[in-house]
Amino acid sequence: MRARLTSRRGFSLVESLAAFAILAMTLTQLLNGVSGGARNESRADFLFRASRQGASHLEALGVDAPPPLGQTSGRYPDGLYWFLDVTPGKTIAGAAGGKPIAISFHARLEIRKPSGYGETFTLSAFKIKALEQRLFGQ
C-alpha cells in the first residue's frame, strides 16, 4: 500500500490538459472583454468628436455667407471626413408679394471615420436665414 501512495506524485496527463483547457477558455473570455471595451471606447470617441464638430459646422452654415447649395465635402483637422448636402426650401416673401425677407434650407451632414467599418454619424437641420432688410424704408 505504501508503494502505491509514493508512486503517485503530481498530476496525470489528463488532469494537466484539463487545467490548461480551462485556463485557455478563461483567458480567451478575458481578452474578448478587453478588446470589446477598446472598441466601445473608440466608438464613443468618434461619436463625441463627430457630434461636437458636426453641430458647430451646422451652426455656422449660412451665417456669414449664403449656404452652399448642393453637395460639398471635406476633412476636419482631426481626420474625420464630412459630406454636406444642402437643399433649398421655400422663400418667404414680404408684405403684398414684395421682396423676399427670408430663405429656408435643409442641411444633412454625414461624418465618417477615415479608417472605419462604415461608421458614420449623421446630423440634419432645417434653417431659416433672414435676408438683409432696411427698416422703415431707409
Image: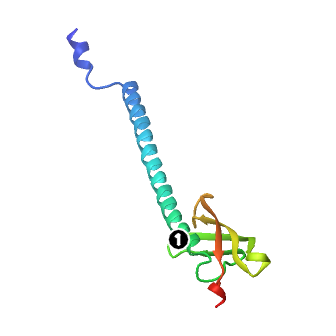
Percent across and percent down for residue 63 are 59, 78
Q: Residue at x 64, y 75 (%)?
A: 129
Percent across and percent down for residue 126 are 65, 65
Front residue of 63 and 56: 63
Location of residue 125 with respect to 36 vertically, above or below: below
In the picture, which quadrant includes the C terminus? bottom right
The image quarter containing residue 113 is: bottom right
Q: Secondary structure at mark 1?
A: helix
Q: Callout 1: 10 Å neighbours few (<14), some, many (20+)?
A: few
Instruction: Looking at this view, name the residue that lies furthest to the bottom.
Output: 138
Front residue of 100 and 63: 100
> How many numbered dots are placed on residues in this image?
1
Q: Residue at x 55, y 67 (%)?
A: 54
Q: Residue at x 50, y 56 (%)?
A: 43
Instruction: Looking at this view, name the residue that lies furthest to the front.
Output: 136
Disc 1: which residue: 56
Q: How is the image coloured?
A: rainbow
Residue type (three-letter) at the residue carrying disc 1: Ser
Location of residue 105 with respect to 116 vertically, above or below: below
Percent across and percent down for residue 81 are 59, 70
Q: Residue at x 45, y 54 (%)?
A: 41
Front residue of 32 and 129: 129
Instruction: Looking at this view, name the residue that lies furthest to the left.
Output: 2
Percent across and percent down for residue 135 are 62, 85
Instruction: Looking at this view, name the residue that lies furthest to the right.
Output: 97
Q: Is residue 125 left or right of residue 53?
A: right
In the picture, which quadrant includes the N terminus? top left
